Amino acid sequence: MTAAGRKAEEGEGGSKMDIKILENNKAAGKLTFILKDSTVAFANTLRRIMMGEVPAMAIDEIEFHKNSSILYDEVIAHRLGLVPLKTDLKSYNLPEKCKCEGKGCARCQLKIVLKSNKGDEMIYASELKSKDPAVKPAYPEMPIVRLLKNQSLELEATAVLGRGRNHVKWGPCHAYYRHKPVVEMDKGIKNPEEIVEAVPGNVFEVKGGELEVAKESIWKYDLAGAAERASKGKVRITKGNEIIFHMESFGQLSCKEILKASLDILDEQLDELTAALKDIE
Ligand SMILES: [Zn+2]
């Protein structure tokens, strides 16, 4: 839609929540964006849903057939639980929302086996053999246990969807935010480069003749204090009404999938609230 078209849809003076992508590093699973015309309350809701409510796949139960490694069954089980598994949200249900009513079926459980009898080798996450090629370790090079000569490990694991609020192994990402800093400069300052040079540590940069907080410093400092001290009060930093939001995927889902799933969950929660309100006289 064109800017003019958008304006017309919003109506005069209206404001619509908007997202502007600052950085989208798909390979590293990192996404930074600006939430425009939003609030801290909304950003925090999004953050909490992303980390605690968006489901991801993780190993939850293990049956050990053989384990003569140096690590106890419990320790290996703990390590395997924390291996991020590529998650396919369309093909699996949360056990409590599945048609089998939590008994366990192909729609809510996935068997994964690990078998090593060779001995004298490092077992990596890549040894986990899943029956579903879409669900496999996101980082195959993660070490599980070092087997010595004549040691073996054989197990059958069950992976299920779960939520980060129940166990961090099911959390798909880390997310945080802050107000976008806005720089206010005294009119007397002719050359903003002076401030860039006066404040150590690459806090500021000049873009299009305007003094701005440098990209790499946005998350780093108590900017307000640093700016005022170094410029002797000529530059002030205030909180803008834009919020910078950063998220890092742990590998189960892409940032876009997590963001989309979190909005669907928020939608669902609001629908539940609307339905509950109908019962109130
Ligand atoms: Zn099921």
Image (cartoon, rainbow, N blue to C red):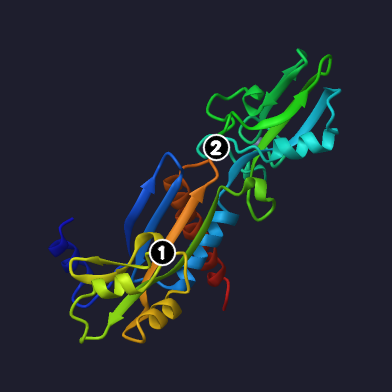
Q: Amino acid at mark 1?
A: Ser
**Residue 103 appearing in the image:** no
Is the C-beta of the residue carrying label 1 under 8 Å from the nearest atom of ligand 1? no
User: How far apart are labels 2 and 1 at the CA level?
Assistant: 34 Å
Q: Amino acid at mark 2?
A: Thr
Q: Secondary structure at mark 1?
A: helix
Q: Residue 251: x percent and y percent? A: 53, 40
Between residues 167 and 131, which one lies in front from this camera angle?
Answer: 167
Quadrant in the rendering for residue 101: top right
Is the C-beta of the residue carrying label 2 under 8 Å from the nearest atom of ligand 1? no
Residue at 45% x, 80% y: name it: 225
Give neighbour class at mark 2: few <14, some 14-19, many 20+ (Cα, 10 Å). many
Q: Secondary structure at mark 2?
A: loop
Between residues 38 and 273, which one lies in front from this camera angle?
Answer: 38
Residue bearing the label numbered 2? 87
Q: Is residue 111 above or below residue 187?
A: above
Residue bearing the label numbered 1? 217
Q: Quadrant of the N terminus?
A: bottom left
Q: Residue 204: x percent and y percent? A: 33, 68
Q: Judge depth for marks 2 and 1 and give the one in front.
A: 1
Between residues 68 and 91, which one lies in front from this camera angle?
Answer: 68
Residue at 22% x, 82% y: name it: 189
Q: Quadrant of the C terminus?
A: bottom right
**Residue 171 appearing in the image:** yes
In this picture, residue 59 sits left or right of residue 232: right
Residue at 37% x, 64% y: name it: 202
In this picture, residue 281 sits left or right of residue 116: left
Residue at 47% x, 69% y: name it: 221
Q: Residue 45: x percent and y percent? A: 51, 65
